Amino acid sequence: MLASHVQDYIVRLTLATHPEGQWALPITNRYVRWGASPRGSQALALAAKIRALLEGRYNVSFQDVRRVYLPAMRHRIIVNFEAQAEQIEPDSVLRELLEKVEENAE
């Protein structure tokens, strides 16, 4: 089980990959064609749990989520033609989302 604030962060990180969505950032709207599905959130949560267990902890931290975000999500978004033309990789988009999505919702 995840703490509600960590779970909320995972959901917001996933929703930030959806163009024109409530949590979308300008980079998402500009370069993403398809965002991650709900299974992306599930994969991110499971990977973060495993990360915490590998470090000997039973609680999942924001840091655990950030550490597994790229491997869990890079194949779950599809960039648009503009991104391809400008050689923008999914990792570039995801890194910016990771930097700008706040850990705590306001």
Image: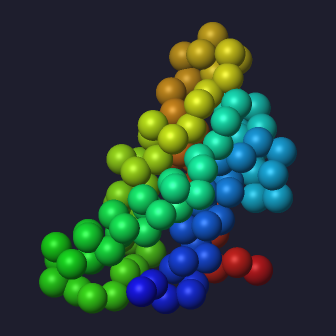
Q: Which residue is at 63% across, 11% downward?
A: 85
Q: Nearer the viewer, residue 82 or 99?
A: 82
Q: Which residue is at 44% across, 75% downward?
A: 62
Q: Residue 101, percent across and down?
A: 63, 62
Task: Classify the position of the N terminus by image quarter.
Answer: bottom left
Q: Would residue 31 be found to the left or right of residue 6 on screen?
A: right
Residue 99 seen by the camera = no
Where residue 15 sits, quadrant-wise, is bottom right
Residue 55 seen by the camera = yes
Check the image and report above or below for 27 versus 70: above
Task: Classify the position of the C terminus by image quarter.
Answer: bottom right
Q: Residue 40, percent across and down?
A: 51, 54
Q: Would residue 66 be found to the left or right of residue 103 on screen?
A: left
Q: Nearer the viewer, residue 86 or 53?
A: 53
Q: Residue 60, percent across and down?
A: 37, 81
Q: Which residue is at 61% across, 76% downward?
A: 8
Q: Which residue is at 83% across, 45% downward?
A: 20
Check the image and report above or below for 16 versus 28: below
Q: Nearer the viewer, residue 37 or 69?
A: 37
